Image: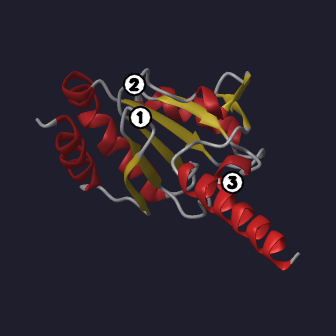
Amino acid sequence: MKKKHLSAFLIILYSVLYFHVQGQSLIPDIQIKTIDGESTSSTSIQNEGKPYILCFWKSCCNSSLKFMGALNEVYPDLVEAYGIKVFAIAIDDSRTSARIKPLVNGNNWEFDFYLDANMELARAMNISLTPHCIVYDGANNIIWKKSVCMEGDESVIEAELSKITNQ
């Protein structure tokens, strides 16, 4: 009887660890909103087999604003060289989320923007500090991530992308 319990325990433990490790790079299925207020699933964030970046940020965070501006400057080059997409997830609360769309439009930022006002996605991905970027390859594997990104990290991101595309 003890062998059966031990075997069952080991199978369960293996399953939990396997799926935990396998699911590390996957984005959890959480409802978020576009900056136009439409609900969508976070699982819709993808780039058809090409690399992409998830960038969590706040409109009241000076570091976020500087990094988003720096990333936007190199974005056209990253799109041309790697076919990348940037998905910017604002984690402003419901009181300040109304300023996101005017801020994005005023800065001419070209990314795909979403709102995570209750920080459900951020919490599910264990993100608390901003700006926080995660770079995925085309197969949804994390190739680089950093909390509290700064100006200059966009060149690190480009270097990581060049490694996976052999450019």
- Residue 79, relative to residue 154: is it above or below? above
Q: Amino acid at mark 3?
A: Ala
Q: Is residue 35 left or right of residue 9?
A: left
* Secondary structure under the numbered disc 2 in the rendered image: loop
Q: Earlier in the sequence, mark 2 or mark 3?
A: 2
Q: Residues within 10 Å of mark 1 (few under 14, many from 20)?
A: some
Separation (CA) of disc 2 from disc 3: 23 Å
Mark 2 or 3, closer to the camera = 2
Residue ID for mark 2? 49
Q: Residues within 10 Å of mark 3 (few under 14, many from 20)?
A: few
Question: How far across and how far down the image is residue 132, in percent?
Answer: 48, 55
Q: Amino acid at mark 1?
A: Ala
Residue drawn at point x = 24 percent, y = 41 percent: 161
* Secondary structure under the numbered disc 3 in the rendered image: helix
Give whichever of 51, 56 is nearer the camera.
51
Q: Earlier in the sequence, mark 1 or mark 3?
A: 3
Q: Amino acid at mark 2?
A: Gly
Residue drawn at point x = 33 percent, y = 29 percent: 84
Separation (CA) of disc 1 from disc 2: 6 Å
Q: Is residue 94 left or right of residue 53?
A: right
Residue ID for mark 3? 124
- Residue 5, relative to residue 92: is it above or below? below
Q: Quadrant of residue 33?
A: top right
Give whichever of 146, 8 is nearer the camera.
8
Q: Which image quarter is the N terminus in?
A: bottom right
Q: Residues within 10 Å of mark 2 (few under 14, many from 20)?
A: few
Give whichever of 108, 10 is nearer the camera.
10
Colouring: secondary structure
Residue drawn at point x = 68 percent, y = 47 percent: 121
Does the CB distance between marks 1 and 2 fall below 8 Å?
yes
Indicate which disc residue 139 carries.
1
